[in-house]
Image (tube, rainbow, N blue to C red):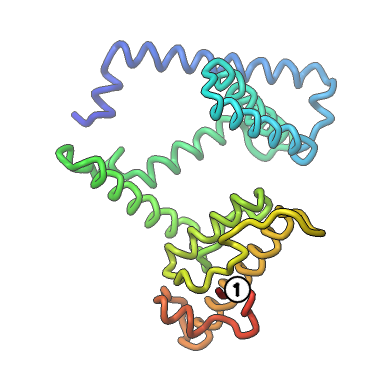
Amino acid sequence: MSAPEADAADPAHTADSERIAHGLTEAVEVMDRLWSFGGWEVTQTHDSLRPYLLEETYELLDAIQQGDTGTVKEELGDLLLQVLFHSRIAQAAGEFTVDDVAAALVAKLVHRSPHLRDAPIDPSATVEEKIAAQEKAWEERKSAEKSRRSCLDGIAMAQPALALAEKVRSRGAKAGLPEDLVPDLLRVIHLGGPESAEERLRKATLTFATAIRTAEDTAEQSRGKRTALSPDDWRTFWPTGNDSCAR
């Protein structure tokens, strides 16, 4: 019997699952009642809720930084409300329901984590070995799902500049991009000046991202196919006139 099957057969595990399911069902029902009232909730859209989603996310981050368990629990609830609210808006538009959201998440997690289903990881493996196996399987299946042409595909470009810069640098590094092509503006944050540090970093990151995509496209045009690039390949196909994207 596999570990998930053993957990499912455990009475204590079953009781916990039922309790959690009941709590989530109640939350969905409350959202439905608020929506059925026909007041403020039904006037909202995905776009109008964006400020609330962002605010709740930062409040959760603050609570985590402060180590305040009670506030973390409260803010997680506020984020859950955002999930329920957006799902209810989509349901009213005939697009999807909160059940569809949960089902999509389960399908993604199981598909990208084969050790949960049909490819168990050696129980005697070290934590480091288990993590390496998980990351490898996750990236392989994610890549196959998305059929991405660029190493930057799928990055949310509207995220805060620092998070965006870190994500672009991380994706580039995983794709073999050499460190010497990373611009200084993505290495050190300078405060002051006519532009905010946030705006300067965002502009530099977007310029860097454009250079990465251009190098990928140029390499494909030269080779006739889309293949992985070595550090030397990146330097060879790096767009000229992008000295601002080099050290």
- SS under mark 1: helix
Horizontal and vertical percent position of residue 186 = 59, 62
User: Which residue is depicted at the point 17% across and 37% down?
Assistant: 123
Horizontal and vertical percent position of residue 46 = 74, 39
Which residue in the protein does label 1 denote? 245
Q: Report whether 162 appears left or right of 108.
A: right
Viewer-side residue, 60 vs 100: 60
Q: Report whether 119 appears left or right of 221.
A: left
Horizontal and vertical percent position of residue 122 = 17, 42
Viewer-side residue, 64 vs 138: 64
Horizontal and vertical percent position of residue 109 = 42, 41
Classify 230 as above or below 115: below
Q: Amino acid at mark 1?
A: Cys
User: Which residue is depicted at the point 46% across and 81% down?
Assistant: 225
Q: How many marks?
A: 1
Image quadrant containing the N terminus: top left
